[in-house]
Amino acid sequence: MVNSLARGFADAGEEVVLAAPSDSTCPVPLAPGMRAADSRELGMRGSEMNHAIRAYDAMGQVDVIHDHTLTGPLYAHRPRVVPVVTTIHGRLLPEVAEIYRAMSRDTSILGISYDQVHQAPDVPVARVIHHGMDLADVPVGSGRGGYACFVGRMCPDKGALEAVEIAHAAGIPLRLAAKVQEAPELEYFHDVVEPVLGPDDEFVGEIGEPDKYYLMGESLALLNPIQWPEPFGLVMIEALATGTPVITTRAGAAPEIVDDGVTGYLASVEDLPGLLLMAGELDRAECRKIASQRFSAGRMVADHLDFYRELLNR
């Protein structure tokens, strides 16, 4: 999302400085003094804090800083004359909500879905801005592959097991694309999902974007039976961008992304097999059209720039 925003701001004629690792390939000016990326440090708070300190030290002369980390806005020595915006990318669990309430004293907070921010209504969120994506290189598929697909992390929350059960109940082959590398992912796949795969199902592993969009585009539907209040769910807009309807539960932000009966179906897991059989009746061109209108990178960029201007005027 940061990559899409940085590119979009530059395309809109704005001056952009991106505080990313020094080996970032995003084609905008990078903040000086940043370290190179190290995948072994992903998710480690110490590494994140080190990057944030270097980033703030390089940004004393900008108009607005948008910090997508959790720890960065709490840095005591950030430039006090520059307004800071942050985006909540995860769930607002009670302990996290407490952090954002404290942060809101000197930081503007954005949410990525209304369901997300409703989890903690006392956190002062200035605006909700849905994610968007660049649709230019996403082809619209035919949907004639004769299968449904599941794309997501291999974990109980994402509903891989439920996807298999729904596809079997509907009598439709399933293709599953997911990363299976970490110990919990391996355990869940080998102990729970793999034993129930049928002869018509196929596990294709982790795939890159071109293969992912082809898998989605030729699919009858994306099965996304999420089992947790997911704050957004990028995989759903990716599917819609390929023209593929989404069959999902009403958990989390799914009702903000999927128009029931238009771009997919929202229902309980028990009712999804019958709805999967009806997915072929939905208009794939409408799925792509709505993705272009509501979930494009251009719309996301415009919403952010509008908020920055409002913030500066205020």
Image: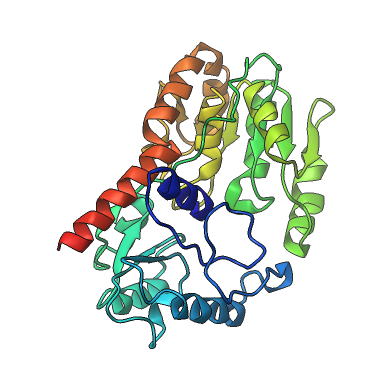
Residue at image position (37%, 52%) is 14
- Determine the residue located farthest toward the right in the rendered image: 199
- Determine the residue located farthest toward the bottom in the rendered image: 76
The answer to whether 87 is drawn above or below residue 261 in the figure is: below
- Determine the residue located farthest toward the left in the rendered image: 314
The answer to whether 172 is drawn above or below residue 33 in the figure is: above
Is residue 118 at all visible to an observer of this figure?
A: yes
Q: Toward the viewer: 21 or 85? A: 21
The answer to whether 93 is drawn above or below residue 168 in the figure is: below
In the image: residue 67, left or right of residue 204: left
Residue 155 position, x and y percent, is: 66, 53
Q: Toward the viewer: 202 or 129? A: 129
Residue at image position (80%, 32%) is 202
In the image: residue 219, left or right of residue 258: right
Its colouring scheme is: rainbow
Residue 72 quadrant = bottom left
Q: Toward the viewer: 66 or 69? A: 66
Q: Toward the viewer: 186 or 214? A: 214
In this rendering, the count of numbered labels is 0
Residue 93 position, x and y percent, is: 42, 68
Residue 104 position, x and y percent, is: 28, 73
Residue 37 quadrant = bottom right
Quadrant holding the C terminus? bottom left
Residue 98 position, x and y percent, is: 34, 77
In the image: residue 173, left or right of residue 166: right
In the image: residue 49, left or right of residue 297: right
Is residue 114 at all visible to an observer of this figure?
A: no
The answer to whether 299 is drawn above or below residue 60 in the figure is: above
Residue at image position (59%, 74%) is 34
Residue at image position (23%, 55%) is 309
